Amino acid sequence: MPDRTDAAGAMAETILGLRETVRREPLRPEAHFQLANALISNGSGVEAAGALHRTLALVPSFTGAWNNLGILHTMRSRLPAAAVALHRAIAADPAGHDGWNN
């Protein structure tokens, strides 16, 4: 069974790789989104919010980014900002389930 230091090292390596991808392909919204998700998993919420905002600057209707930004704001007890982000997720994909379920 891998220990926590192995998992932390693997996450750090993943984040470094995603940062490099974002550096090489700054107009690729999926790269910013994946970086944000890795940063959220790593407990780096402020930096993750920045990556989500960069995703949304590239694709304003990116439902997953709005949803994850809403969840991140909720985790940080920023409920008005969470409500705005989740409403944007719903507006981007009214038939989707993410915004409605969060």
Image (cartoon, rainbow, N blue to C red):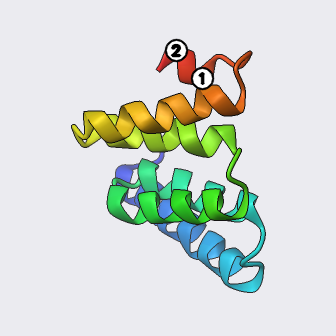
Work out how far the residue at label 2 is from the one at label 1, CA to CA, in angstroms: 5 Å
- Residue lying farthest bottom? 24
> Which residue type does callout 2 highlight?
Asn
Relative to the observer, which residue lies in front, 9 or 45? Answer: 45
Residue at (43% x, 51% y) in the render:
40
| Dot 1 crowding, Cα within 10 Å, few <14, some 14–19, many 20+ | some
Which is nearer the eye, 71 or 19?
A: 71
* 71 lies left or right of 75: right
The residue indicated by pointer 1 is: 98
Q: Is residue 85 left or right of residue 24?
A: left
* Residue in the foreground of this view, choosing between 19 and 93: 93
- Above or below — where is 3 with respect to 35? above
* Displayed quadrant of residue 18: bottom right
Q: Secondary structure at mark 1?
A: helix
Can residue 53 be seen at all in this image of the molecule? yes
- Tell me which residue sits at (74%, 57%) in the image: 30
Q: Residues within 10 Å of mark 2 (few under 14, many from 20)?
A: few
> In terms of secondary structure, where does tag 2 sit?
helix
The residue under the point 51% across, 29% down is 87
Give coordinates of residue 39: x percent, y percent: 46, 58
- Amino acid under label 1? Asp
Marker disc for residue 26: none
- Res. 21 image quadrant: bottom right
Between 6 and 27, which is closer to the camera in this rendering? 27
Q: At x 39% / y 49%, what residue is drawn?
A: 3
Please provide percent x and percent y for residue 5: 37, 59
* Residue 84 spot, x, y in % from top left: 43, 36
The residue identified by callout 2 is 101
Verify CB contact (< 8 Å) between mark 2 and mark 1: yes
